[in-house]
Image: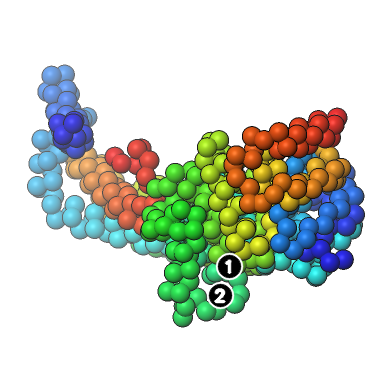
Amino acid sequence: MSAFVTLDGVDHAYAGAASALAVEGLSIAVEQGEFAAVVGPSGCGKSTLMKLATGLQFPRSGSVTVAGQKVSAPVKIAGMAFQAPTLLPWRTTLENLLLPLEIVEPYRSAMRRRKAEFAERAEKLLASVGLGGQGNKFPWELSGGMQQRASLCRALIHQPQLLMLDEPFGALDAFTREELWCVIRDLQAASRITVILVTHDLREAVFLADRVFVMSSRPGRIVVERKIDLPRPRDLEVTFTPAFTDIVHELRGHIVKARQ
Amino acid sequence: MTRTNLLIKLSPWLFTIGLFVVWEAAVRIFKIPSFFLPPPTLVAQAFVDYAGPLARNSWITLETTLIGFALAVGFGLLLGLLVGWSRAIYAGLYPLMIGFNAIPKVALVPILVLWFGIGFIPAVLTAFLISFFPIVVNVATGLATIEPELEDVLKALGASKLDIMRKVGIPRTLPYFFGSLKVAITLAFVGSVISESVASNYGIGNLMLQAQAQFQVPLIFAGLVVLAVEGIAMYAAMAILERRMTGWAQRSGFAQA
C-alpha cells in the first residue's frame, strides 16, 4: 500500500438518498506525483469520488487512505477547483488567493505577521498562470478564463500535496480551455503535485494524465484503467497525432459501454 | 446622452411637482370642498400655521421609529444569523415567525398598552415588531445561499463552521441585509404611526387623529406629507448606506440608478 490516494472497495450513498448508492465497490490507487484523470458518463459519481478523497464525505463501507492515513476528517493537504470559479466578489483576486491561508495551519496563525510574504507568494503564483499584476482587480473584472486561473491559484496557494479538479475547464470556450490545459500541465510538471482530475472531456484527460480511469454509470466504479504513455513534455500538437486519437477513440468505446 | 442623464436626475422632482399641480388643479376645477380634499396651497398654509406642533410631533415620530428600527436591526440580525446557522433552528423557528408575521401588528397595540401604558414604549415596540421580520428573512437567505463548492473548498482545508460564517457567510449576506433595511425602515414608520394613532398623546399619528377630531382637514394632510418626507429621507439614507457598504454587489446596470 504505497499509493498516495487509495480508495478500496468503497460503497457510498448520500444521506437522504436511502437506497441508491452513488458509488459501489469503487477502488482506485493514485501514486504520489501522478496525474490521474477520471472520466465517465454524467452522474456516475465522479464528484463523490472527489468528496471521498478529500474527507468531505466518509464511505459507508470500504476504506479511503490519503498520504498513508485513513481519512476520517477533511484532509487539509488538498486544494480543490471546480467548474465555477467561486471567487468571493468582495475580495480582490489577491485577497481571494489568501483565503485558504487564513484557514489552514500553519499559515493561519502566521497570517498577521507574514502577510506581506504571503501576498508576494500569491503574486508569484498569479504571474505563473499569466495573471501577473492582476491581483488588485476584483474577480468580476476578470474574464471567465482568468477567473478560472485565479481559482486554480487559490487551490495551490497553501502548497497542497494533492490537487483535486472537478471539471475545472468545463465552462470555458475551446481555446481558453486548451490554454489552461497547458497552464495546469506546467504547474504539475514544476511541482510534481499529485493531481486527480475529474472530467468528461476525453481529449483533456488523455492530454494531461499519466493514467485515465473510466467509471461506470451509477453506482460508479472503475471499469477500465488506461496508462497514457505519450512522452512528456506534451505539446498541444500531440492531440492531433494518430497515437493520441487512437487512445481517445479507445476510451470513448469504454464510455459508450459504461453508459449501457 | 448628458441630456437624458439630466432628465433622469430631474424627473423625480418633475413628477412630484406634477402631482401637486394636478392635485391643485383638480380641486379647483371640480370645486371639491376643502374639508373633503384640501388643495396643496391650503396644506402648505397649514404647515405655516402649525409649524411648531408639526415639527415637535414629527421629531417624536422620527425618534420613535428610529429606536424601534434600531432594535429591529439588532434583533433581526442576530435571529437571522441564528436561523441561517442551523437547519434545525431554521425548521423550528420558521413556522413560528411566519405565524407571527401574519398577525396584523395593530392588533398587538392593545396588549402593549396593557403592559406598558399609553405612549412612547408601545409605539417603539410596534415599530420594532413590524420591521424585524424582513431583516431576519433576508439575513437567513443570504446564509442559506452560500455556494456549496466554496463551502467544500474551505471545509477540505479544515475550516470550521464559524470560519465559513466569518469569511464567506456574513460578507455575502451583507447585500441582503442592507437591502432589507430599506424595507424595514418604511415598515417601522407604519408601526410607530399606527401605535401613535391608537394609543399615544404624541407623534404625527396622534396629531392627525386630533386634527381629524377638530375637523382641521388641511392639517391631516400636512401630517401625511410629513410622514412621506420622513419616509423618503430614511429610505434614501438606507439606500446610500447600502451602496457604501456593498458596492461590490451593485455592479449591474440595474444598480446604477
Tag 1–tag 2 contact (CB < 8 Å): yes
Is residue A141 something that shows in the picture?
Answer: yes
Going by the image, does B97 lie left or right of B121? right
Q: Could you say whether the residue bearing mark 2 is in a helix, strand or loop?
A: helix
- Classify 10 Å Cα crowding around label 2: few (below 14), some (14-19), many (20 and above): some
Please tell me which residue is depicted at 85% across the width and 31% down the height of the picture. Answer: A257
User: For the point 38% across and 58% down, which residue is it?
Assistant: A133
- The spot of residue A165 in percent (x, y) is 65, 51
Q: Nearer the viewer, mark 1 or mark 2?
A: 1
Question: Which quarter of the image is occupied by the N terminus of chain A?
Answer: bottom right
Q: Quadrant of residue A73?
A: bottom right
For disc 2, the marked residue is A107
Give the Cα separation between the discs numbered 1 and 2: 8 Å
Q: Is residue B52 above or below residue B18?
A: below
Determine the secondary structure under disc 1.
loop
Residue plotted at (73% across, 51% down): A210
Residue type pointed to by label 1: His
Left-right relation of A223 to B59: right
Q: Is the residue A44 above or below the residue A102 in the image?
A: above
Q: Residue at x 13, y 50 (%)?
A: B50
